[in-house]
Image (cartoon, rainbow, N blue to C red):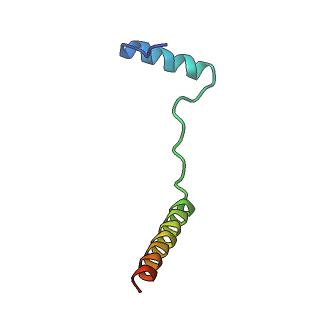
Amino acid sequence: MSGPETIEEELAIIAEALEAGIDPFLPKKEPNPWVKYAIGWFIVIMVVSWVSKALMRTL
């Protein structure tokens, strides 16, 4: 199925969705700070691991 080619077609699709009770404009999700913390700690642990491996090879 191809998308609407004109603005009128798109407005008709949106109107049909609203009549059917479907909200085509969903609210944005709140950003979750725990994801950033988890990725940050994972990177910190990986860097510490790599640095310790490199130091063990040189010493």
Q: How many discs appear?
A: 0
On screen, 22 above or below 11?
Answer: below
Q: Position of residue 8 (x, y in %)?
A: 39, 13
Residue placed furthest toward the bottom:
59
Q: Position of residue 50 (x, y in %)?
A: 45, 72
Residue drawn at point x = 47 percent, y = 79 percent:
52
Residue drawn at point x = 46 percent, y = 82 percent:
56
Q: Quadrant of residue 26?
A: top right
Q: Quadrant of residue 32?
A: bottom right
On screen, 18 above or below 25?
Answer: above
Residue placed furthest toward the left:
6
Residue 5 horizontal side relative to residue 42, left or right: left
Q: Position of residue 19 (x, y in %)?
A: 60, 19
The quarter of the image holding the C terminus is bottom left
Residue drawn at point x = 55 percent, y = 64 percent:
38
Instruction: Name the residue nearer the viewer: 49 or 39.
Output: 49
On screen, 58 above or below 33?
Answer: below
Q: Position of residue 17 (x, y in %)?
A: 57, 21
